[in-house]
Protein backbone atom coordinates (compact mmCIF):
# COMPACT_ATOMS: atom_id res chain seq x y z
CA UNK A 1 0.00 0.00 0.00
CA UNK A 2 1.36 3.38 -1.02
CA UNK A 3 1.94 5.98 1.64
CA UNK A 4 1.48 9.72 1.17
CA UNK A 5 5.27 10.06 0.86
CA UNK A 6 5.31 7.48 -1.97
CA UNK A 7 2.52 9.33 -3.78
CA UNK A 8 4.34 12.63 -3.37
CA UNK A 9 7.55 11.11 -4.75
CA UNK A 10 5.61 9.67 -7.70
CA UNK A 11 4.01 13.06 -8.44
CA UNK A 12 7.42 14.75 -8.24
CA UNK A 13 8.91 12.17 -10.61
CA UNK A 14 6.06 12.73 -13.10
CA UNK A 15 6.58 16.49 -12.91
CA UNK A 16 10.33 16.11 -13.52
CA UNK A 17 9.66 13.82 -16.49
CA UNK A 18 7.24 16.35 -18.02
CA UNK A 19 9.77 19.14 -17.44
CA UNK A 20 12.54 17.16 -19.13
CA UNK A 21 10.26 16.48 -22.11
CA UNK A 22 9.40 20.17 -22.46
CA UNK A 23 13.06 21.24 -22.27
CA UNK A 24 14.02 18.52 -24.76
CA UNK A 25 11.32 19.77 -27.12
CA UNK A 26 12.61 23.35 -26.85
CA UNK A 27 16.18 22.20 -27.55
CA UNK A 28 15.03 20.09 -30.50
CA UNK A 29 13.14 23.00 -32.08
CA UNK A 30 16.13 25.33 -31.63
CA UNK A 31 18.45 22.66 -33.06
CA UNK A 32 16.22 22.20 -36.12
CA UNK A 33 16.24 25.95 -36.76
CA UNK A 34 20.06 26.09 -36.48
CA UNK A 35 20.44 23.12 -38.81
CA UNK A 36 18.04 24.69 -41.31
CA UNK A 37 20.03 27.93 -41.29
CA UNK A 38 23.30 26.02 -41.80
CA UNK A 39 21.84 24.09 -44.74
CA UNK A 40 20.61 27.31 -46.36
CA UNK A 41 24.06 28.88 -46.01
CA UNK A 42 25.77 25.77 -47.41
CA UNK A 43 23.35 25.82 -50.35
CA UNK A 44 24.12 29.48 -51.11
CA UNK A 45 27.88 28.83 -50.87
CA UNK A 46 27.62 25.82 -53.19
CA UNK A 47 25.59 27.81 -55.75
CA UNK A 48 28.07 30.71 -55.70
CA UNK A 49 31.11 28.44 -56.01
CA UNK A 50 29.56 26.51 -58.90
CA UNK A 51 28.76 29.79 -60.67
CA UNK A 52 32.37 30.95 -60.26
CA UNK A 53 33.75 27.65 -61.59
CA UNK A 54 31.38 27.67 -64.57
CA UNK A 55 32.39 31.25 -65.32
CA UNK A 56 36.07 30.27 -65.15
CA UNK A 57 35.49 27.30 -67.48
CA UNK A 58 33.69 29.49 -70.02
CA UNK A 59 36.46 32.08 -69.97
CA UNK A 60 39.11 29.33 -70.17
CA UNK A 61 37.31 27.80 -73.14
CA UNK A 62 37.69 31.08 -75.04
CA UNK A 63 41.15 32.00 -73.81
CA UNK A 64 43.53 30.23 -71.37
CA UNK A 65 43.35 31.92 -67.97
CA UNK A 66 46.87 30.96 -66.95
CA UNK A 67 48.34 30.84 -63.45
CA UNK A 68 47.15 34.33 -62.58
CA UNK A 69 43.62 33.45 -63.61
CA UNK A 70 43.69 30.25 -61.55
CA UNK A 71 44.83 32.21 -58.49
CA UNK A 72 42.05 34.74 -59.10
CA UNK A 73 39.47 31.94 -59.29
CA UNK A 74 40.75 30.45 -56.03
CA UNK A 75 40.58 33.88 -54.38
CA UNK A 76 37.00 34.37 -55.59
CA UNK A 77 36.00 30.93 -54.27
CA UNK A 78 37.51 31.67 -50.84
CA UNK A 79 35.98 35.16 -50.70
CA UNK A 80 32.51 33.93 -51.72
CA UNK A 81 32.64 31.08 -49.21
CA UNK A 82 33.70 33.33 -46.33
CA UNK A 83 31.23 36.09 -47.21
CA UNK A 84 28.21 33.77 -47.52
CA UNK A 85 29.22 31.88 -44.37
CA UNK A 86 28.98 35.13 -42.39
CA UNK A 87 26.34 37.14 -44.24
CA UNK A 88 23.47 37.75 -44.31
CA UNK A 89 23.13 37.71 -40.56
CA UNK A 90 19.68 36.51 -39.40
CA UNK A 91 17.54 39.46 -38.37
CA UNK A 92 16.05 39.27 -34.88
CA UNK A 93 12.28 38.91 -34.97
CA UNK A 94 10.47 41.99 -33.69
CA UNK A 95 6.82 42.43 -32.77
CA UNK A 96 6.52 44.93 -35.60
CA UNK A 97 7.69 42.27 -38.08
CA UNK A 98 5.06 39.85 -36.78
CA UNK A 99 2.36 42.22 -38.05
CA UNK A 100 3.69 41.80 -41.60
CA UNK A 101 4.32 38.04 -41.61
CA UNK A 102 2.03 35.90 -43.83
CA UNK A 103 -0.48 33.94 -41.79
CA UNK A 104 1.01 30.54 -42.63
CA UNK A 105 4.40 31.64 -41.26
CA UNK A 106 3.04 33.53 -38.24
CA UNK A 107 2.96 30.66 -35.67
CA UNK A 108 6.59 29.64 -36.19
CA UNK A 109 7.78 33.26 -36.28
CA UNK A 110 5.91 33.97 -33.05
CA UNK A 111 7.30 30.79 -31.49
CA UNK A 112 10.82 31.90 -32.38
CA UNK A 113 10.17 35.38 -30.95
CA UNK A 114 8.71 33.89 -27.76
CA UNK A 115 11.73 31.61 -27.33
CA UNK A 116 13.92 34.72 -27.41
CA UNK A 117 11.94 36.22 -24.51
CA UNK A 118 11.99 33.03 -22.44
CA UNK A 119 14.85 33.88 -20.09
CA UNK A 120 13.17 37.17 -19.12
CA UNK A 121 10.06 35.34 -17.85
CA UNK A 122 9.43 33.85 -14.39
CA UNK A 123 9.75 30.07 -14.09
CA UNK A 124 6.00 29.22 -14.28
CA UNK A 125 5.66 31.43 -17.36
CA UNK A 126 8.61 29.68 -19.05
CA UNK A 127 6.81 26.37 -18.74
CA UNK A 128 3.72 27.88 -20.34
CA UNK A 129 5.84 29.51 -23.05
CA UNK A 130 7.26 26.07 -23.91
CA UNK A 131 3.76 24.60 -24.12
CA UNK A 132 2.55 27.51 -26.27
CA UNK A 133 5.56 26.99 -28.53
CA UNK A 134 4.62 23.34 -29.09
CA UNK A 135 0.99 24.29 -29.84
CA UNK A 136 2.13 26.96 -32.28
CA UNK A 137 4.24 24.33 -34.02
CA UNK A 138 1.11 22.16 -34.34
CA UNK A 139 -0.96 25.09 -35.59
CA UNK A 140 1.49 26.16 -38.32
CA UNK A 141 0.75 23.47 -40.96
CA UNK A 142 -2.99 23.87 -40.36
CA UNK A 143 -2.82 27.47 -41.62
CA UNK A 144 -1.19 26.59 -44.95
CA UNK A 145 -4.54 26.49 -46.76
CA UNK A 146 -6.50 28.96 -44.61
CA UNK A 147 -7.60 32.07 -46.51
CA UNK A 148 -6.26 35.31 -45.01
CA UNK A 149 -9.74 36.85 -45.45
CA UNK A 150 -11.50 34.21 -43.35
CA UNK A 151 -12.78 35.38 -39.92
CA UNK A 152 -10.80 32.54 -38.30
CA UNK A 153 -7.61 33.91 -39.89
CA UNK A 154 -8.22 37.34 -38.37
CA UNK A 155 -8.79 35.82 -34.92
CA UNK A 156 -5.61 33.74 -35.13
CA UNK A 157 -3.55 36.73 -36.29
CA UNK A 158 -4.95 38.87 -33.47
CA UNK A 159 -4.25 36.26 -30.77
CA UNK A 160 -0.87 34.99 -31.99
CA UNK A 161 0.57 38.10 -33.60
CA UNK A 162 -0.80 40.83 -31.31
CA UNK A 163 -2.23 39.76 -27.95
CA UNK A 164 0.50 37.22 -27.04
CA UNK A 165 3.43 39.58 -27.79
CA UNK A 166 1.69 42.52 -26.09
CA UNK A 167 1.09 40.47 -22.94
CA UNK A 168 4.78 39.54 -22.72
CA UNK A 169 6.02 43.02 -23.57
CA UNK A 170 3.62 44.58 -21.06
CA UNK A 171 5.12 42.35 -18.36
CA UNK A 172 8.67 43.22 -19.42
CA UNK A 173 7.93 46.93 -19.08
CA UNK A 174 7.20 46.46 -15.36
CA UNK A 175 10.36 47.20 -13.30
CA UNK A 176 11.95 44.05 -11.89
CA UNK A 177 11.41 44.93 -8.17
CA UNK A 178 7.66 45.46 -8.76
CA UNK A 179 6.96 42.20 -10.56
CA UNK A 180 6.35 40.31 -7.32
CA UNK A 181 4.50 43.12 -5.57
CA UNK A 182 0.72 42.53 -5.31
CA UNK A 183 -1.46 45.03 -7.12
CA UNK A 184 -5.23 44.65 -6.80
CA UNK A 185 -4.61 41.28 -5.16
CA UNK A 186 -2.31 39.80 -7.83
CA UNK A 187 1.33 40.29 -8.75
CA UNK A 188 2.47 41.01 -12.32
CA UNK A 189 4.06 37.52 -12.34
CA UNK A 190 0.66 35.97 -11.57
CA UNK A 191 -1.10 38.16 -14.13
CA UNK A 192 1.39 37.07 -16.79
CA UNK A 193 0.93 33.38 -15.96
CA UNK A 194 -2.87 33.70 -15.99
CA UNK A 195 -2.77 35.49 -19.35
CA UNK A 196 -0.48 32.86 -20.87
CA UNK A 197 -2.80 30.11 -19.64
CA UNK A 198 -5.74 31.74 -21.43
CA UNK A 199 -3.72 32.13 -24.64
CA UNK A 200 -2.50 28.54 -24.46
CA UNK A 201 -6.10 27.31 -24.15
CA UNK A 202 -7.26 29.56 -26.99
CA UNK A 203 -4.53 28.32 -29.34
CA UNK A 204 -5.41 24.73 -28.46
CA UNK A 205 -9.10 25.36 -29.18
CA UNK A 206 -8.31 27.06 -32.51
CA UNK A 207 -6.12 24.14 -33.55
CA UNK A 208 -8.83 21.67 -32.54
CA UNK A 209 -11.47 23.59 -34.50
CA UNK A 210 -9.31 23.65 -37.63
CA UNK A 211 -8.58 19.94 -37.22
CA UNK A 212 -12.28 19.23 -36.76
CA UNK A 213 -13.00 20.97 -40.04
CA UNK A 214 -10.43 18.76 -41.78
CA UNK A 215 -11.87 15.65 -40.10
CA UNK A 216 -15.40 16.61 -41.14
CA UNK A 217 -14.22 17.12 -44.73
CA UNK A 218 -12.44 13.76 -44.68
CA UNK A 219 -15.55 12.03 -43.33
CA UNK A 220 -17.72 13.71 -45.99
CA UNK A 221 -15.37 12.55 -48.74
CA UNK A 222 -15.33 9.06 -47.26
CA UNK A 223 -19.14 8.87 -47.26
CA UNK A 224 -19.22 10.18 -50.84
CA UNK A 225 -16.79 7.50 -51.98
CA UNK A 226 -18.74 4.77 -50.18
CA UNK A 227 -22.01 5.87 -51.81
CA UNK A 228 -20.35 6.15 -55.22
CA UNK A 229 -18.74 2.72 -55.09
CA UNK A 230 -21.94 1.18 -53.75
CA UNK A 231 -23.88 2.68 -56.66
CA UNK A 232 -21.25 1.40 -59.11
CA UNK A 233 -21.56 -2.11 -57.69
CA UNK A 234 -25.36 -2.04 -57.97
CA UNK A 235 -25.30 -0.73 -61.53
CA UNK A 236 -22.61 -3.28 -62.45
Image: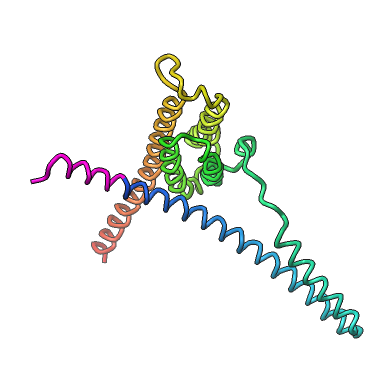
Q: Left of 140 or right of it: where is 56? A: right
Q: Please state the horizontal and vertical placement of residue 223, each as a whole percent of the image.
A: 29, 52
- Which residue is located at x 60 percent, y 64 percent? 39
- Which residue is located at x 82 percent, y 81 percent? 57
Number of marks in picture: 0
Q: Is residue 58 above or below residue 152?
A: below
Q: Is residue 38 above or below residue 206?
A: below
Q: Is residue 133 above or below residue 31?
A: above
Task: Please state the extent of the stretch shown in magenta in the rendering.
Answer: 1-15
**Which SS type dominates the magenta stretch?**
helix
Q: Please state the horizontal and vertical placement of residue 27, each as a whole percent of the image.
A: 47, 53
Magenta stretch: includes residue 223: no
Work out which quarter of the rendered image holds the C terminus and state it: bottom left
Please identify the residue farthest to the left as the structure is shown.
1
Q: Please state the horizontal and vertical placement of residue 82, each as a whole percent of the image.
A: 74, 65
Residues 179 and 71: in front is 179
The image's colour scheme reads: rainbow
Q: Left of 92 or right of it: where is 128? A: left
Q: Is residue 77 above or below residue 61?
A: above
Q: Please state the horizontal and vertical placement of residue 222, each as a whole percent of the image.
A: 31, 54
Amino acid sequence: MQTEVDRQIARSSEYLDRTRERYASVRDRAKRRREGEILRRVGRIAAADVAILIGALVVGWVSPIGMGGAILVMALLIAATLFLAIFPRPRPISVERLHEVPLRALPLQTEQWLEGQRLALPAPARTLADTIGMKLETLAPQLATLDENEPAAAEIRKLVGEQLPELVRGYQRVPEPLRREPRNGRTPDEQLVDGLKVIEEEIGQMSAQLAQGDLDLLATRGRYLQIRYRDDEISG
